[in-house]
Image (cartoon, grey):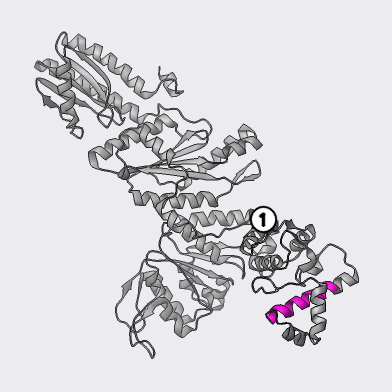
Amino acid sequence: MLEKIVVGEVDSVTFLIDFCNFIFELLSEILGNKAYGIMLTKPSGRTVHVLVHNISDVELDTIVKALEDVVSATEAPLEIGKFKVMPISGNLSNYGYMFVSDLSEHETYLVEKTCAVLSKFTELLGTVDFYVIDPSTGLPGKKYLENRIDEQIQRKIRYGENFSLIVMKLENYDEVLKNRSEESAEALMREIARFLLKIKRKSDIISRLDVDKFAILVPHTTASGTESFVERLQSTMDFETFHVNNENITCNFQIGFINSENCNFLEHDEILLNAMINLGGKTKQSQQKQSEFSFEIVGDSEKIRECKREILIAAQTDMTVLVLGETGTGKELVAKKIHELSARREKPFLIIDCASIPESLLESELFGYEKGAFTGATSRKIGLFESAEGGTVFLDEIEATAPSMQAKLLRAIEEKVIRRVGGTEFIPINVRIISASNIDLEEAVKKGDFRKDLYYRISGMTIKLPPLRERKSDIPQLVTYFVKKYSIEQGKIIKGVAPAVFEAFQSYDWPGNVRELEKEIERLIAYTEDGSYITEDDVSNKILPFMKHTFTLNELVENYEKNILIDALINCNWNESKAAKMLGISRTSLISKIKKYYLRKPSGSYSKN
């Protein structure tokens, strides 16, 4: 019997019923023709299994109705009419009662011991894993989940504790299976399971619900708390790329959930059904914020995968983070992503560029000021640290702060209090600090240009972003992403990018990093005909030398002339007279060259880098 249960051929409820039948036979040996019975119930009070001897239907009905009013009773025996009722308790959800009448002292002792055995057995079933374990992921299966849901229902009834059930479906599972072996598809599900186990709370229970579904049972949580968690979970799963057999697989997840605060369901099948009905549904928060955080960290090189891993780790904590990288590598993007994936995501994310604000103004921007603090301070102003209460403050180019400002920042971070300029009151703050620098701050500390104590305070975790020249394998993905983004923005259909352009991009070192690549794509789309390919004709002069295509002298001269014309026209906002004067040619000559190169004013202003 035990072996069958372990492999899932018999569930624990059936096993418990069989054991109750055995106990009932044992009672007949002890009590003979006296009135007695055993009733197993769901946490909701619904009867699962009843065994009675010498008890009429009227008496049984009286017992059942009386017990419905004492679902949350203690484990102490109850008196219902002539019957002594003893609760069967344990960790399993199938609780119940044993009831007997007219007992002698000796019989009472034997019956109480028998009930204790049944209770102990019920508890044993709840603590030993008698449920099907999914052999692929090692997670418990559906029956285990159902019993844990029943336990939560019992806690809801008895103590008013709310819980949630979240169901996750791999939407493109069939597509994954179609293009790969079944072993690869299951390997993917194992990777997803490992990932979920890393990001779950200790009290959360994760199970394999179906071939393409996982379930997360979340105890002690409200409906609003669940919405926030589901938002973070969706963002986290969308952010992650899974790796199976040296292949990167992008997964699309649908997430549905149900919280006991918003329902009156008292059976696990209703809870499961409604969570699955909600698959793909938007939470109230996601409906309000669906256009927010439309940015992505694009790329799948080893260095970017490591950065994504660090972002996920940072998002699960509240420590300070220092993001290092050259100009244009995406430091602000990383800070936004950490905020989006963190528990603070519903609170403000505020940015301040420390290099662009004079020292005299930086303090008032961060800490605020009181009325009359200085000339022009006609009213109180709330600073960024107060405005971002509960959220995140991103200090960009923090290396540009003066020593006096560094001391004030250190105090704010250490003591979690600020004082407005001109004020005397210390104000507590609750913000997360993420800082960024495009220099090696450790070297700056050694040179005495940056406070050592502040450096250690802001670098609880350090994320170093690689320059684009060190991850050129990501360039095709980045180009595809930016072409899609700006073709939609400019209302054009771009068929693709010429191979020669990709070759040039792979050869060029991109000193401006991803930002420079993005602006180059934006510019190329501006000068590409709707429905055409991006070709080398409009590539910036600085990139042309990296073309592997062999140009004739005339082609090089024409490309050079064409790009000079474009630069002049952009700088003069397409005023032909001004552009001609800038170039030192007549307006007639300029118009002739515009026609020669099929130049047209785009629907916006674009810079030629």
Horizontally, residue 73 falls left or right of residue 554, namely left
Which residue type does callout 1 highlight? Gln
Q: Residue at coordinates 36% horizontally, 51% vertically from top-left?
A: 225
Is residue 249 shown in magenta? no
Q: Is residue 101 above or below residue 454?
A: above
The residues colored magenta run 558-575
Horizontally, residue 601 falls left or right of residue 422, namely right
Q: Residue at coordinates 24% horizontally, 14% vertically from top-left?
A: 24
The residue indicated by pointer 1 is: 477
Q: Is residue 137 above or below residue 520?
A: above
Secondary structure of residue under mark 1: helix
Is residue 570 shown in magenta? yes
Q: Main secondary structure of the magenta part?
A: helix
Q: Is residue 203 above or below residue 11?
A: below
**Camera-nearest residue between 505 and 414:** 505
Rendering quarter of residue 33: top left
Q: Percent from the top left, x then y, of residue 166?
A: 42, 42
Which residue reaches farthest right? 553
Rendering quarter of residue 185: top right
Horizontally, residue 562 falls left or right of residue 34, namely right
Q: Percent from the top left, x then y, of residue 143?
A: 41, 29
Task: For residue 48, say whether it is visible.
Answer: yes
Q: Percent from the top left, x then y, of residue 268?
A: 35, 33
Task: For residue 148, say whether it is visible.
Answer: no
Which quarter shows the C terminus? bottom right
Q: Residue at coordinates 75% horizontally, 71% vertically from top-left?
A: 540
Which quarter shows the N terminus? top left
Which residue reaches farthest bottom? 375
